[in-house]
Amino acid sequence: MTRGEKEKLEEVYRELMGKEPKKEMFNKTKFLIIPIFLALLFLANLAYAGNPPFRKDIGYHSSTWLFNKEIVFIKRVDHKKSNYGLNPFTNFIKGFANFPEYTTVRTDYYISSMKTDGTDERIIRQFATIGKRFEEKLKPVIVEDGKDIPIEKEICPYTVDCFSKEGLIVFDSSVSLKNADIYIMKTDGFGLKKIAKKARCPRFSSDGTKILYNSGKDGFWIMNADGSNKHKIIDGNVWAIWHSDGKRILFNYIGTKDHYLYMINIDGTGKKRFIKGGVRLSDWSPDGSRFIIGPSMYTSEGKEIWNPFLASRFKNPKKYSIPYNGRFSPDGTKIVGEPGQGWPKGLGNIVILSSDFATIKVLRKNETINIYWRGKR
């Protein structure tokens, strides 16, 4: 074979096995690139589009006693709508922009009651805020007979207290002092009345004639139950509760190096240092023998009788520390509140602890409900 014939044969071989086959293969596969890309985009989209289109987040807090066998509490329900749909391109853009998965389109606030076994829940009064789009200003309403009645300022109850003998409930309208007002009403929900502005955390005195409340860095104030005769009792950034006799206030300073508790008369006189203990005050027993500071309990003389350390030492039977924001029952035998230090996680959000610290009853837990088809709320 001559050199020319050999070169010609190699050229024919390259055409058959090299250039042309590769070009033909590319022509066949290039049409698959777009479908493959769309398929990958669709699979990535499932991370967002697979979320339920609607969701309800239910939370419970601020429980207190109406009677020995009835508890008043606040229930909050956030109705949420997914911001992601089936369109992979918009989902990709929203995900890249770190857009939230859900927008709250309505929040209902219920002041409700139930028996101490968790049954017979009833709504005393319902309030709500309504919005349709992300970052839209919410519209406040009061709900009466299933109808939304617009109001000028939102009412989002955060803390609640009761005076059972007169059938009264007092509550604040926001977690933020800037927006918080104090309202009073009857235990059937009627007679709603605003009695203080820019005020939070109201507490009835033992005889129900006065209300102690917080005004932020402006200290704690006292007013009559009808909202009259407001006067400052303690100046500065403090936290305070009633003594069971209704004539004195127990308080401590917040955010300072002073870690002592103080006692003061309701007319502002007789301030005395009591004991050392700089955590949140919760409640004083009706008989005046004990009071609660955070997860601990003390005698009226200031002697600590129960704390998380003591609770952890009891393995059989199991003992528990005091619930967070614990409130004594009217007969002083039980404490209602939220699981606190040393409690198992996920136990619940409204619990009752027996006076021997050994028996608990879980009444309510926060929960999330996924909704795949929207019906009536």
Image (cartoon, grey):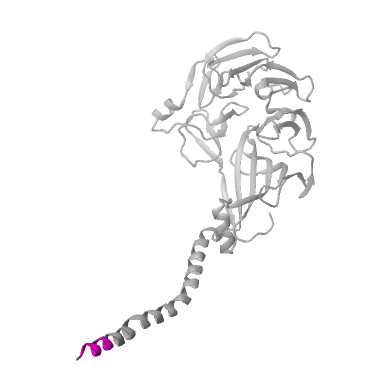
In the image, is residue 50 part of the stretch drawn in magenta? Answer: no
313 left or right, relative to 99: left
x 68%, y 45%: residue: 108
User: The N terminus lies in which quarter of the figure?
Assistant: bottom left
Residue drawn at x 49%, y 61% is: 44
Q: In the rendered view, would you say 268 is above or below 148?
A: above
Q: Magenta segment, principal secondary structure?
A: helix
Quadrant housing residue 318 = top left
Q: Which residue is farthest top?
A: 270
Can you say whether 256 is above or below 7 in the image?
Answer: above
In this rendering, would 350 be left or right of 316?
A: right
Residue 51 seen anywhere in this rendered image of the structure = no
Instruction: Say left or right for 98 vs 3.
Output: right
Residue 3 on the magenta segment: yes
From the top left corner, tell me how far across and down residue 52 is, in percent: 57, 58
The relative height of residue 357 versus residue 304 in the rendered view (above or below) is: below
* Quadrant (top left, top right, bottom left, bottom right) of the C terminus: bottom right
Residue bounds of the magenta highlight = 2-9
- Is residue 99 among the parts visible in the rendering? yes
Residue 55, given in percent of the width and then of the height, sits at 60, 53
Which residue is more in the foreground, 48 or 126?
48
Occupied quadrant, residue 342: top left
User: Of residues 136 and 304, which is closer to you in this image?
Assistant: 136
